[in-house]
Image (cartoon, grey):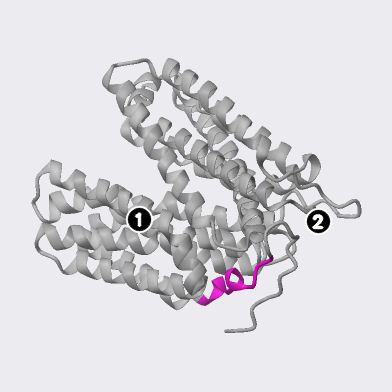
Amino acid sequence: MSEVVYEPRDVRRARYAVAAVFAVHGAVTGSFATRVPWIQDHAGVSAGQLGLALAFPALGASVAMPLAGSISHRFGARNALRGLIALWTMALTLPSLAPNLLTLCLALFTYGATAGMADVAMNALGVEVENRLGRSIMSGLHGMWSAGALIGSAAGTLAAHLGSDARLHHALAAVALTVFGTVACQWVLDLQPAEDEEPPPRFALPPRSALLIGAVGFCAVFAEGASLDWSAVYLRDQLDTSAGLAAACTTGFTLTMALARFVGDRVVDRYGAVRTVRFSGLLATLGGLLIVVSDQPAPAMAGFALLGLGIAVVVPLCFAAAGRSGSNPSLAIAGVATITYTSGLIAPSAIGGIAQATSLVVSFCLVTVLSSGIVVFARVLRTGDRDRPKAGRPDTAVPDPRP
């Protein structure tokens, strides 16, 4: 991208604009998730068929993510994000229109493809704003995504409670979110490719550095997916709690993650990405150990809270490190995003398969082992600890020579 000099106020405004886009992206996800039962009934699919269909968003994202760099190069970062976020918000309408399994799979593939491309574009711009501000913002941006998901979920829950048709609900939500998202894009950084800059390949393997960073993200997202889908089941079946207390555990885990992301940037600015992730991994590992050794609900819930606190900032910092790990940030971010999407796809089923063969305790032993992997491999995020430029200046930082 060309080196454009922005005034500090423009960079600060761009930060808020990107944060709004993150919230919009999360709101689409929350709006969809709450209406999955309605979509299942409308398409007339069984639980097993629904599970198959729900694999298609991750497949679509994995295929389409590498295209985001080419789109940004051709149209510029601002126009690319505006178009991709509009495609993503409007794709919300597709699953509820599907009348059968085949059309539902196609709709979810498109839904996932647009989600993945918008995800790469907004994270790339988030990293660029972070570079120009000279301080960490990625954790807070992902916190905005969580906040958007909670808002979308709340609206979806209300719509479901009122018995509204998901086609109408999603159409109205898509229009509102499209307008909000495209307006917010007006103030993101308008980065353009340099005249002599070669366009990135449409499809290419991510760099080795992105694979290593993605491995750390894989561990964190696996723990997140396992906890979101199985924490309530763990408390109900393993510790014999009530359904209400089990559900409260999942809610507490989600809120802990969101709150940790909003304060995570201050910790990163003070201690750096590597030390923050190492400490986060220790917290997550301690939480996992507490879960598997507890025979009472209270310590197990505390364990899930520690697990959420520990993994909250890991994925944002993986994206930040990927965006500074080489000459093609979009390709590196796409590689990390693909790995983390894959982790989120396989985690719930892997936990269920292990639990079926052994027990849920053994399943969360695996989660604990992966959490410890965050500690071991945290140093691959050292690109996130380089010196950063002052606000308004191009990124001329050099790698941090410290191990």
Residue 33 in sight here: no
Between 312 and 359, the one nearer to me in the picture? 312
Q: Quadrant of residue 18?
A: top right
Classify residue 179 as left or right of residue 153. right
Circle number at residue 369: none
Circle number at residue 350: 1
Residue depth check, mark 1 versus mark 2: number of the one nearer the observer: 2
Give the residues drawn in magenta, as a range: 379-389
Tell me the CA gap for discs 1 and 2.
45 Å
Judging by the rendered image, the residue that carries numbered circle 2 is: 3
Classify residue 349 as left or right of residue 210. left
Between 89 and 52, the one nearer to me in the picture? 89
Placement of 307 over or under 341, stated as above or below: below
Placement of 74 over or under 201, stated as above or below: above
Identify which residue is drawn at 27% across, 71% down: 286
The kind of residue tagged 2 is Glu
Classify residue 357 as left or right of residue 130. left
Image location (x, y in percent) of residue 336:
57, 58
Which is nearer the N-term, disc 1 or disc 2? Answer: 2
User: Which residue is at the far right?
Assistant: 196
Residue 125 in sight here: yes
Q: How many marks?
A: 2
Q: Secondary structure at mark 1?
A: helix
Identify which residue is drawn at 78% across, 46% down: 73
Identify which residue is drawn at 36% across, 27% down: 155
The kind of residue tagged 1 is Ala
Residue 380 part of the magenta-drawn span: yes
Quadrant including the C terminus: bottom right
Image location (x, y in percent) of residue 123:
59, 50
Q: Quadrant of residue 364?
A: bottom left
Q: Secondary structure at mark 2?
A: loop
For the stretch drawn in magenta, the main secondary structure is helix
